[in-house]
Image: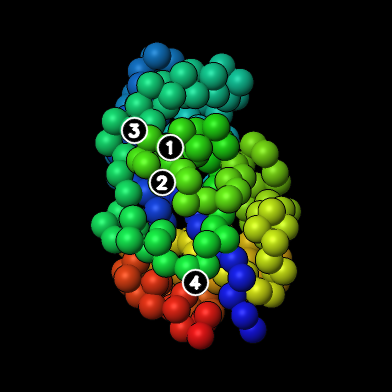
Amino acid sequence: MPLDGVIYDLDGTLVDSRDDLADSVNAMLTRLSLPEREPRVIHGFIGEGAERLIRRSLGPAHETRYPEAAPIWREEYAKRLLAKTRLYGGVAALLRVPPEARGVLTNKPGAFAREILRGLGVETAFRAVVGGDEAARKPAPDGLLRVCAALGARPQDALLVGDSAVDLVTAKAAGVRVCAVTWGLGERAALATADYLCDTPSEVGELLARLRS
């Protein structure tokens, strides 16, 4: 099968945003007069969208405060989208590897995702960016199919690159091949069913070259 389009997850795949997300959650908790959490605990809550991040951070005892907490988190995260967030090493070079039809599918709010990509100087590498507030969140296939359509690639001719089991489920539901990457937030054991497994961005670049040859 040809490779006509590649779609990347954002957090844990293209960018390391863990510390900014943890800092924004703890700022939210402080404003709610709740105890802060260890950053590594918050890191484990990342990947399934802002709502789940906030609810998990609040915990069962305070989850009912979600309507109050959500706008506070958005305000705090907006202040620090690019404070500590960086591209993973090798990603800038990867984004120069064909195909040129690239997209981003993330459970992060779309406006935040585009601002991060713009601030890191890579927004123009992508023809489409779809956030978790702009389509049904992963693992629903809707957003992935929407990005494929925007790239002009049939699902069977596209590749999703992501770091979590959620990405694997999303790709399967959409009929898209999936490459799991091990440098992000997901546990390697949870990625074993991916079509391809890569340990570095350069390996992903080599995979793209092979699939296009």
70 horizontally vs 209: left or right: right
Task: Measuring from the top left, give residue 4's x and y in whole percent.
Answer: 61, 70
106 or 6, which is in the foreground?
6
Amino acid beneath label 2:
Val
Nearer to me, 188 or 155 = 155
User: Looking at the rendering, in which quadrant would you find the N terminus?
Assistant: bottom right
Q: Earlier in the sequence, mark 4 or mark 3?
A: 3
Residue named by callout 3:
82
Q: How far apart are marks 4 and 3 (CA)?
A: 27 Å
Q: The residue under label 4 is which amino acid type?
A: Cys
Q: How crowded is mark 4: few (under 14 residues within 10 Å), some or many (20 or more)?
A: many
- Give me the C-alpha separation between circle 2 and circle 4: 21 Å
Is 44 left, or right, of 38 in this rendering? right
- Give the alpha-carbon distance from disc 1 to disc 4, as whole Å: 25 Å
- Circle nearer the viewer, 3 or 2: 2
Residue 122 image label: 2
Q: In the rendered view, does 154 fall on the left or right side of 13?
A: right
Q: State the mark number for residue 118.
A: 1
Residue drawn 43% across the image and 41% down it: 117
> Please, is residue 98 above or below residue 91 in the view?
below
Report the residue marked by disc 4.
Answer: 179
Q: How crowded is mark 2: few (under 14 residues within 10 Å), some or many (20 or more)?
A: some
Density class for disc 1 (Cα within 10 Å; few <14, some 14-19, many ≥20) is: few
Q: Is residue 30 above or below residue 195?
A: above
Q: Earlier in the sequence, mark 1 or mark 3?
A: 3
73, above or below 114, in the image = above
**Badge number at residue 65:** none
* Residue 77: quarter of image: top left
How far apart are the two marked residues, 3 and 2, measured between alpha carbons?
13 Å
